[in-house]
Amino acid sequence: METTLPQTETHRVASRLQELCSTGRYMEALTELYGDDAVHVEAMEMPGTPRITKGKPALVKAAEQFAKTTKVYGGSVGTPLVNGDQFVCSMTIDCEHTEGPMAGKRMEMTEQCLYTVRQGKIVEAKFFYPTC
Amino acid sequence: METTLPQTETHRVASRLQELCSTGRYMEALTELYGDDAVHVEAMEMPGTPRITKGKPALVKAAEQFAKTTKVYGGSVGTPLVNGDQFVCSMTIDCEHTEGPMAGKRMEMTEQCLYTVRQGKIVEAKFFYPTC
């Protein structure tokens, strides 16, 4: 089997993120690949989620909350596309919230994710999806 | 017919870029929507195209060169997705170079484009596509 070797730190992080997230290992991705001061930038504020979340402890807490209140049926991560210290990939998730106003409603969501990598760690993830 | 009004400068620029580029009006998009110091960042250097092109005059020159040496059969621009002062959209182009080593070879290319908007003008466009 032929494989293409990752060429840069950005490629390495991108491949590993795809590997982990496409098998639902979101928390492992966060722990292993994120820098301490990493930032998540949502396209908009949502109930229980601010537009910007700063720092790994806050991101881990949010991921724990998500895991506790969401049933994940499946998902996918598209091939990451790298440009310098950034990469984009599409992500889909098929899930159902188990608490709150959206409880019991199964949803399929798709987003484009833009990651910035510095010194081998993700320092920012920015999410793009329809907001209106 | 119902329309959704653009909410911010970024939305306005994104909509107009989609409108112009989806009808092949690339030069008009450049002239109307780009700031004087705008930068294009390719994922890699290509024959005749540096990785980074700086300034509107250089971008206009590159677009003129592209128009002169490329036959465009069609293309599309996906719905722009906005996050703050940035937006992403997918672009496809079905074209054939009329000069150089690739002359006569019809190609369909797809890329994800990330635009940054400041004071109502595009200041950076970054392109993501497979490089290996």
Image (cartoon, coloured by chain):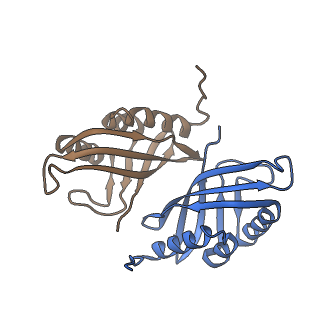
Chain colours: A blue, B brown
Residue lying at the far top in this picture: please name it: B1
Instruction: Pick the residue in front: A20 or A123.
Output: A20
Residue A49 visible, this angle = no
Most distant residue in the right direction: A100
Q: Residue at x 51, y 44 (%)?
A: B118
**A23 on left or right of B102:** right
- A18 or B69: nearer the viewer: A18
Q: Is residue A112 visible?
A: yes
Quadrant of the snapshot with the C terminus of chain B: bottom left
The residue shown at (37%, 61%) is B43
Q: Which quadrant of the figure has residue A6?
A: bottom left
Residue A57 is left or right of residue B47, and the answer is right
**Residue in the image at 53% along x and 77% along y:** A120
| x then y, percent, for residue B65 | 20, 45
Q: Position of residue B37 (x, y in %)?
A: 38, 48
Q: How many marks?
A: 0
Percent across and percent down for residue B20 are 39, 33
Q: How far from the left and from the top, in percent, is residue B90?
A: 45, 47
Q: Is residue B58 left or right of residue A107?
A: left
Q: Is residue B5 above or below residue A17?
A: above
Can you say which quadrant of the picture contains the N terminus of chain B? top right
**On screen, residue A73 above or below B94:** below
